[in-house]
Every structure is written in C-alpha cells, then in structure tokens.
Amino acid sequence: MSAPMSLRARNAAANLVYTVLPERGARPLAIPPAGSGLQPVMGDPGLPLLGHTLGALADGLSMARRGYERFGPISWTNVISLKIVSVLGPEGIGTVLANKDKAFVNAEGWETFIGPFFERGVMLMDFEEHHHHRRIMQQAFKRDRLVTYLDMMNPAITRGIDAWQPGSEFLMYPALKQLTLDIATEVFMGSELGPEADQVNRDFINLVFGGNTPIRADVPGGRWHRGLQSRKRMEEFFLRQIPEKRASESDDLFSVLCHAESEDGERFTDRDVVNHMIFTMMAAHDTSTITAAMMCFFLAQHPEWQERVRAESEALGKETIGYDDLDTLTSMDLVFRETLRMNAPVAMLARMAIKDTEILGRYIPKNTLISLGLFSSQRMEPWWHDPDTFDPERFTPERAEDKSHQYAWVPFGGNVHKCIGLHFGGMEVKALLHQLLLRYDLRVDPGYEPLIDMATGPYPADGLPLTLTPRR
C-alpha cells in the first residue's frame, strides 16, 4: 500500500508536468491504409522515456478527461514505456467488448500488465479456450452454490466485526481487507488459514501491486520481483492441498472446482484449479474490499443515505441476510451501484488487437495495446450527468442513467468476459454492510476526502479513517 506522503509527492510531480511543461503536439498512431476511409488515432506521446507515466499513476481520471477534450473518445499515449490506445465511452468500449470480428484478445492484453502474476486465470483466456474454462467454472457460481456460500460467509462476517475495536479514526480499509480475506479463505477454501494468513494476505497484495509499477523487471526489492515470488508461493500453497480437495465433497469453492464438470464431462486439471483459485481469490478479495470500503465512506459522508439503507436492513428483523433477502434491499443496491460507478474497483480492461481493425472509425493496427477506461468513462460527461456527485437515485427506474447505453455502466465488464463472480461479489458486500450498519453508525470528518491511489482500481491509500459508534 502506498504511503499517503508518497502519494502527495507523486501528485505534486504530476501537477508539475501538467501545469509547467507544455503539451507536445498531436501525432497519429499510424496512417490508415489508403482507401480505407478510416481516420488515424491521434495522441500525445508525452515526455521522452517517461511519456505520461506520472500523470497516469497520480491522477488517471484527470488525464483521461484531458485526453478526451483534446482527441475525443479514442486516443493514444506512452505510459510505463508502452504505447497504449485509450478507449472512453460506451460506444467505443462496447465495440471492443462485443468483439464481433474477433480482432481483440484478452490474453496478450493482460499479459503486459498482470500476466506473470495471474497466469491462466479465466480473464486471461480467449475464444474457445475461454468458453471451455468458463463453462466448467460456472458450476461454482450457480444459484444453489451462492446460497451455500452466503450461509458460510455470514458467520465469518460476524466473527470479523466482533474482533474490531471501533472508535474515532478507525481505519476501515485495512480492517475490511483482513475481513474479506478471512471470508474468501473460509468460503473458497473451507477453513481458516491460521498462522499462514498474514503471509497469504501479503502475497495477494504483492500480486495486485506487481503489475502497477513502471519498473517491470525481476529486480530484488521491486514490486515486480515481490509479485513473482508471491505467485510461486501461492502455487505451492494450493498445490499442496489438491489431493485433499479432490477427495473432499465439501461445499467450499476449492472443492467445487476440483469436482466441477461441464455438461460434456470436462473437468479441470490440478494446474487449472490452482490458476483459477489464485485469480478468483484475488478478484474476490481485492474488488470486494474496495467496494465495501468506498460504500462505507459514501454512507458516512451522506448520513441521509446511511439511515435509508439501515432502515431497510432493520425492517428485515434479521442479524444476517439470506439469499432471498437481497432483492428487498433496494436502497443498498442503489448505493452499491453508484459506488461501483464512482469508484470502479477494476479501473480498466486490457486488450490487444491481433489484426488490423477499427474502433469508431479510427484505424487500429495489429499488435496495438488497448485500455478500456471503465473508471474514467463512468466519471465523465457526456455519458453521465454531474458525474462527480454521489447520487444513487440515478439508478432508479425513473431516471435509469445506466440504461442510456448497453455499455454505459460496466464495472463488471461485458459480453462473454463479463465477471463470472459478479453475483458473489454483490452478495458478499451487501451481507457485510447489512451487519455493519445494524451495529454501527459511520461518521467522517467534514471535508475529509480519502487519498486515492491506484492498484487494480482506485483505493483509499490512507486507510480510510472513519468514526464507528456502536448502536447497541
């Protein structure tokens, strides 16, 4: 986790680039073929060697907004020594996600950023292979499985919150990070980790941050190196347990993946199970933590919404929620959706063009690395009204801003690569917030804004200090 002081220093450096140094001239990414009728993608390469790395790491949203003002929804620049095409807005993002001519692939796109750390995860697969793995993996996320997982996670949530020592300046983000890890290990692995918990937590943090570094080399002491070492430990950790899980008939995800079969009887190899466990544990642990933490912040900042959400939970008359209760928590769902819009826990999706193609009439040559700006697009006009304002009512049926376009609200991605665990993640966050709001009032100092840093998505690097006051 980045220290707040280093984050401030990086922001200052980025602001120096933006305000003191002049913008470089616009340049085409490549010249379209004669007679194609396509326009070139225009962009600004930035500074020599650095490109726009400082701006991207310090304030990617402002950088995206400036790029849109200068070049429109499709532009290119240099970041961490990579030439990247940025795609903003539902039309362009939808074109890539729909992928009608199979011009874009996940594997080579994500390989650049996180491939060494999440090798062979389902998000890093394409076409028939992706369909094959997803079809087997889907068995672990059917409704009856989700019901079982919720029954397993509720006691883990209760134990986790019981262990908190609340008060003023309670650091919500690390507390939730530990809690979601405990939930993931119990629900996904069927037991508590015990003495290995701290190392596993550190390893997942190293995996997440491994791809978020400009120094992409196996240098001892660096993020990339720590990520590679953590990947090796996680592989060994899961492989040791495969024989026991193959012999088990328990309901945890690990056992389910060991036994899951497609309709044609296809099953995962041991290596497949390990790869999917590492990726799924990371995704569930990291994205749920960010979402739950930022929901707590917005509810503390907007007490009228906190009371509205709490009233619905109190009306259930239950300490914990069941699966059928989820649809009754309509206000919580509005807050959940608005939080995912304002603070998408996966900031971007990576793709690679494997043949010459186009996006919105712009020429995209083969081997172009593409970034789909989910976080940025959901915080920008013209696609959202007053996008920096917390306004859950925008998701009500009367307003339905998310329905303005099929790909306007895409925190879980879309089409064949839509997040396989989206229902699990929403269920976990809502189950956690239900218990938390029944037990505590959340307050935040007036004027406080979290120091936001970037990993898989924007997260509160200062730990998110809130005041928790017991209600009973």
Image (cartoon, rainbow, N blue to C red):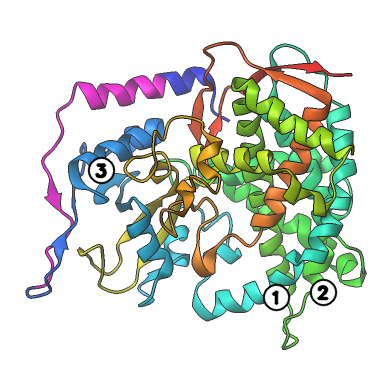
Mark 3 or 2: the one toward you: 3
Whether 22 is among the magenta residues is yes
Q: Earlier in the sequence, mark 3 or mark 2?
A: 3
Q: Amino acid at mark 1?
A: Ile
Q: In the rendered image, which residue does mark 3 sit on?
A: 68
Label 3: how many Cα within 10 Å (few below 14, some 14–19, many 20+): some
Where is residue 136 shown, x and y percent of the image? 70, 75
Where is residue 224 shown, x and y percent of the image? 51, 45
Q: Residue at x 84, y 19 (%)?
A: 471
Q: Is residue 159 left or right of residue 37?
A: right
Labelled pair 1, 2 in contact (Cβ < 8 Å): no
Disc assigned to residue 259: 2
Q: Earlier in the sequence, mark 3 or mark 1?
A: 3
Q: Nearer the viewer, residue 396 or 319?
A: 396
Q: Earlier in the sequence, mark 1 or mark 2?
A: 1
Where is residue 333 shown, x and y percent of the image? 65, 43
Q: Residue furthest left?
A: 34
Q: In the rendered image, which residue does mark 1 sit on?
A: 136
Q: Is 132 above or below relative to 4? A: below
Alpha carbon distance from label 3 to label 2: 48 Å
Q: Is 380 above or below relative to 90? A: above
Q: Provide the residue span drawn in magenta.
A: 9-33
Q: Amino acid at mark 3?
A: Tyr
Disc assigned to residue 126: none
| Image label count | 3
Where is residue 179 shown, x and y percent of the image? 77, 37
Secondary element type, mark 2: helix
Q: Is residue 271 visible?
A: no
Whether 372 is among the magenta residues is no
Q: Quarter of the image holding residue 421?
A: bottom right
Q: Is residue 14 left or right of residue 347?
A: left
**Viewport quadrant of the N terminus:** top right
